Amino acid sequence: MSNPWIAIGALALVGVLIPLSMISVSALLRPSVPEQGKRATYESGEIPTGSSQQIRFNIQYYMVALLFVVFDIETVLIFPWTVIYRDAVGALGYEQVLFPMLLFLGVLVAGLAWAWRNGAVQWVKSPRATRQLSTNNE
Amino acid sequence: MQSETPLPDTLANLLGLDPSNPLVLFVIAVVASGVIASGLLALVAVSGIWGKRKITAAFTDRIAVNRHGPAGILIIPADALRLLSKELIVPEGVDRPAWDLGPLIMVFSALAGFAVIPMGNGIQIADPETGLAYVFAMASVASLGLVMAGYSSNNKYSFLGGLRAVAQNLAYEIPLILTGMSVALFAGTLRLSEIVAAQSTALFSLGGLAIPSWYAFVNPFAFVLFMVANLAEVGRNPFDIPEAPTEIVAGWQTEYSSVYFVLAYLSEFIHIFLGGAIIATIFLGGPAGPVLPGIVWFLIKIVGIYLFTQWARSAIPRVRIDQLIEIGWKGLLVLAFANLLLTAGIVGVIA
């Protein structure tokens, strides 16, 4: 059997060439009609204000990204365990194969529970939204 | 039935060339990849341009495209030409290389994922030992393109859409991979051809009909979890909030026109089929099936999953972003952990 990564590299090359060829075909076909105001970014028909790169957004996006890093590394560490598990558990039994992983997962789940309790996976509402919600409920 | 040699090697042997020569292998693999990628593009053309409209129309009691050719099928070349010949409008203040690279990366990631999928009849570009990890890794490279598209468009809707897309991909990636790993626990390998082979034994016999041990039958709980997480991963209802046309126009796609819009659209559909291919491979026995050849069964399975996403798109309302975060982190992640431990327990009993 040959090295599979050569063939994967070939498909990756094709995966870049296809979009590039579509872009070049389109460049040959399409017209260019520059007009004033055509290039304004879409803001529901209003004249765009400010920059989009400096808008404020919810802190939640940052919190879940931070949480993701932890769990993503955890999945990388679980992958080898899943491969050897079936043979190893037959030869050595639960206490040497499953229990260490239970401990590892237990630490992670405790971390998730802590994040949950502290509201890291609960959508943060702005003070204004909370105020509006409480006036609606009254 | 299942050929062990990957497609480039088979082709090289057919032509009388030596596949151990890296250069020969690379050239032949490019040809083989071109064939598979063209097949995928044809599939996307039928399902994305024509099928999607017909399905949505059937759900909303309309007729949809019916003017060109039988059942309007000739709309496919017409629309392909129309979309490619649209004017490209580059909005003011876009971050130029990133704005161009975003859609390119998305298409690339979806196509590259197909390298390791066994499609039956020996159609598989490569079969590395870490196939399952590779396909998940490639599928999630698309997040990078989404961020680039979102922030570089200089549009507030794009920016919010990009943020939402990333938050969604992050929240559902972990349950997706953890559930995929529960299959690796059963099969004891990450090589996709071996995962398929492990599913070919009979699970039990039902009235003389042998039910194969597909992991969807062995572990239906994992299958349902994976289907839900996959819907979120490809961004279809109830998890289509990155685009949410009634909230943020078109999300990260808002400022894309002409060929870039085509690429974004193409990548979405290839991702749906890549998700379908992963599900078919690790849960539905890959190309296995009676009577018909493997590639036909493989196509039936991935088109079936495509129809499921289109059904969900037409029939299920969209969740809100706060609900999405909570479903992902509090619901699916906990269930995925429970599934992993449950599977580990079961495998320990039968091992």
Image (cartoon, coloured by chain):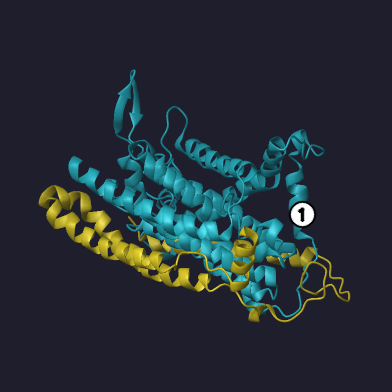
Label 1 chain ID:
B
Q: Is residue B213 left or right of residue B75?
A: left
Residue sitting nearer the eye, B162 or B64: B162
Give percent across and percent down for residue B324.
53, 57
Image quadrant for the C terminus of chain B?
top left
Asked which quadrant contains residue B211, the reply is: top left
> Which residue sits furthest left?
A92
Task: Evaluate whether residue B4 shows in this view.
Answer: no
- Which chain is depicted cyan? B
Q: Is residue A109 above or below residue B101?
A: above
Which amino acid is tagged 1? Leu
> Which residue sits furthest front?
A138
For label 1, the residue is B81
Q: Is residue B7 left or right of residue B256?
A: left
Residue at point 15% right, 51% down?
A: A94
Residue at point 53% right, 66% down?
A: B166
Q: Residues within 10 Å of mark 1 (few under 14, many from 20)?
A: some
Residue sitting nearer the eye, B217 or A67: A67
Classify mark 1: helix, strand or loop: helix
Q: Is residue B112 above or below residue A32?
A: above
Q: How many marks?
A: 1
Residue at point 44% right, 41% down?
A: B120
Give percent across and percent down for residue B241.
61, 58
> Which residue sits furthest top?
B207
Residue at point 43% right, 43% down?
A: B224
Give percent across and percent down for residue B244.
66, 57
Task: Evaluate whether residue B62 shows in this view.
Answer: yes
Image quadrant for the N terminus of chain B?
top left
Q: Is residue A39 above or below residue B41?
A: below
Give percent across and percent down for residue B159.
64, 71
Q: Colour of chain A?
A: yellow
